Image (cartoon, rainbow, N blue to C red):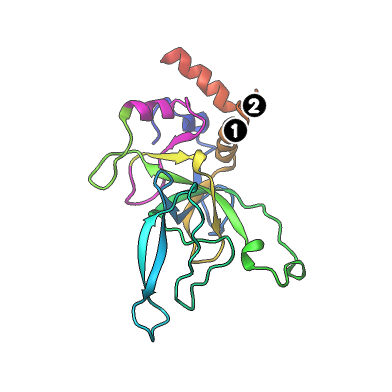
Amino acid sequence: MYPDYCVQQIIADPKNNWWVRNEEGTLCRGAIVFSFVPHFDQTPYTFEPIGRTAATEHNRADVKVEPLKVDRPLKQVALPVAAAPLYRGEVWAAYKAKRRPCLVLGDNAAAVDKSLTRGMPKSSSASTVLVAPYYGADKDGTRAGYNKDFVERIRHCEYPQFIWDMLPLKDGPEASILRLDQLQPIGTHYNSYKVSDFKLSKIALEIVDDVMKWLIWGGLPEESDVLAYKELIKEFM
């Protein structure tokens, strides 16, 4: 049950739900999927090869790890490993990442005729979907969580980059924060994601889309339920 004074209460009636079952198990807009998401507040690292672990081994190498900084001159040195080549302008980058629930927000990329990509790297037209990650709002021994006053402000829709929610998943935090400002692509290869059993209802997805418009274009549509909710909150808070 959602508490009072949250945007989910806009549609809290017997005929509509915020979350519904993803019966088809498809990778679609509004679906919750699990994927590894990098920590964006960190400096990535790069690898500088020192040499092979053994002269006859082509699948292992000794490397020096150092911060990857965008203002440094490009130091492109390929690892002495046959399966890990580098091409012009590329470097190896390593990020910490965590498996998180993510909300699929973009899956409408058009299929590209394979005849148009013949001779091109697969990455030039590889299929992706856009997702935004959820972070646990609760503080416990495994997560830092969010400040309670901050969570309350998020729940009252004061920030376009955050949406407070309660995910219908087992063994997760009681409350979660959707980070729309971390919208990112993930590949559609089966190793890149796992679809959960749930997705947003049509009306819930429309509300999330309104907040996304607010974040990108700087305002909510005049007819948006989110705008009405924000006005209601002012009266009671």
Q: Nearer the viewer, residue 166 or 20?
A: 166
- As drawn, 206 above or below 46: above
> At x 31% / y 31%, what residue is drawn?
147
Q: Residues within 10 Å of mark 1 (few under 14, many from 20)?
A: many
> At x 34% / y 82%, what residue is drawn?
54
**Residue to which mark 1 is pinned:** 210
> At x 69% / y 68%, what residue is drawn?
120
- As drawn, 51 above or below 170: below
Q: Residues within 10 Å of mark 2 (few under 14, many from 20)?
A: few
Q: Nearer the viewer, residue 210 or 160?
A: 160
Q: Amino acid at mark 1?
A: Asp
Which quarter of the rendering shows the N terminus? top left
**Could you say whether the residue bearing mark 1 is in a helix, strand or loop?**
helix
- Could you give the CA–CA distance between mark 1 and mark 2, rounded to whole angstroms? 7 Å
Q: Amino acid at mark 2?
A: Pro
On the image, the x and y values in percent for residue 157 come to 48, 27
Q: Nearer the viewer, residue 224 or 34?
A: 34
> At x 46% / y 40%, what residue is drawn?
178
Of all residues, the one furthest to the left in this rendering is 141
Marker disc for residue 221 = 2
**Could you say whether the residue bearing mark 2 is in a helix, strand or loop?**
loop
On the image, the x and y values in percent for residue 48 come to 41, 64
- As drawn, 60 above or below 3: below
Are discs 1 and 2 less than 8 Å apart at CB?
Answer: yes
Q: Earlier in the sequence, mark 1 or mark 2?
A: 1
State the extent of the magenta-drawn residues as a range: 149-173
Would you say residue 157 sits in the magenta stretch? Answer: yes
Quarter of the rendering containing residue 95: bottom left
On the image, the x and y values in percent for residue 42 come to 39, 46
